[in-house]
Image (tube, rainbow, N blue to C red):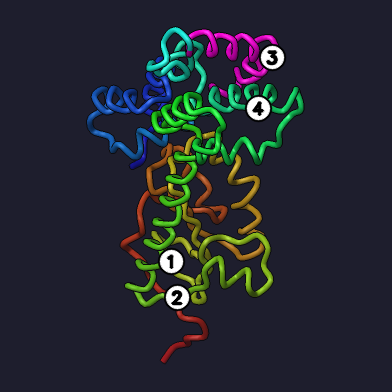
Amino acid sequence: MKLCRAEYKTIAKFTDQLKPTRQSLKLLKERFPHHSQSTLLSIFSLEYQKRTKRSISKHHDPDVIESYYQRYLNEAKTRPSSPILLEMANEVDLSPSLLARVVVERFLQDQEDGVSVSKQVVSSMLREPTLIPDVHLARQVEQCTVNDCCYGPLVDCIKHAIGHEHEVLLRDKLRERNLSFLDENQLRAKGYDKTPDIILEVPIAVEGHVVHWIESKASFGDDQSHRTYLNEQFWSYWNRFGPGLVIYWYGFIAELDCQRDRGILLKDCFPSDIVTLCHGAGPS
């Protein structure tokens, strides 16, 4: 699904008032019923991450962390069955999973006599709350991770699975068209360190543009993420392998598809109008 920049900004502005909980997705879908849930979630996630980067430092101030932790301890005594951390996250406008991480880190400092615990240990507890040596806190953390739609181990797992699913879909589509290709794993086995998802052994033409490689992105392509991908991935692929195709499966801002003449084509689905280019084929 391609959106003009103005339409994207309308959706992005609406997300400013939403919290990163699954209830917000229902409001988003009700407001923009003609857009897919996946596209809306991807846009919401992109915009919320931008919002978080602008404000995260204030939540990591030591005095603020201490206030969050003491409030949690006090309310855990008076309202033990309430989703305290989830409610607090919504109130202070912080991702539930990120607030859970802050509180767990502070809790572990108490357990370890003030010694900081490694990020790996904290991450493992967020992934598996039963590792937290406090049953009540473990339950609170689980509520946060289950209800968070933008951050946390559950979101990371879902994103990884969706990304893999679309890479498999891309390979299946290529095989259906009998197109010969090398995937990322095969390319790394050959010694390439930074590669697109697919390199075509025989190039194709899509809408009159030659394509040597294809990159699969199971996300929406907005200005910021696309600019980052161009600088960190796409142009290096172009330099090494020639012109290519990027598929943003959940859509992109239409105005971003402006590099076709320079060798980078954007699509929101697998192209249907493929022309195979035969190497070495001369006139009969």
Q: Earlier in the sequence, mark 2 or mark 3?
A: 3
Query: Gap in Å between the C-alphas at discs 2 and 3?
Result: 58 Å
Q: Earlier in the sequence, mark 4 or mark 2?
A: 4
How many numbered discs?
Answer: 4
Q: Secondary structure at mark 4?
A: helix
Q: Which residue is mark 2?
A: 277
62 inside magenta stretch: yes
Q: Secondary structure at mark 2?
A: loop
Numbered badge on residue 108: 4
Q: Which residue is mark 1?
A: 205
Note whether 236 is above or below 121 in the view shown: below
Q: Residue at x 63, y 68 (%)?
A: 188
Query: Gap in Å between the C-alphas at discs 3 and 4?
Result: 17 Å
Q: Which residue is mark 3?
A: 61
Q: Residue at x 49, y 76 (%)?
A: 202
Dot 4 amino acid type: Leu
Q: Closest to the observer: 222 or 26?
A: 26
Q: Earlier in the sequence, mark 3 or mark 4?
A: 3
Instruction: Select label 3 or label 4 by which is in front.
Output: 4
Dot 1 surroundings within 10 Å: few (below 14), some, or many (20 or more)?
some
x, y (%) of residue 154? 45, 40
Query: Gap in Å between the C-alphas at discs 1 and 3?
Result: 54 Å
Quarter of the view holding residue 53: top right
Dot 3 surroundings within 10 Å: few (below 14), some, or many (20 or more)?
few
Q: Secondary structure at mark 3?
A: loop
Q: Quadrant of the C terminus?
A: bottom left
Q: Which residues are magenta?
A: 51-76
Dot 3 amino acid type: Asp
Q: Earlier in the sequence, mark 2 or mark 1?
A: 1
Note whether 148 is above or below 244 in the view shown: above
Dot 4 surroundings within 10 Å: few (below 14), some, or many (20 or more)?
some
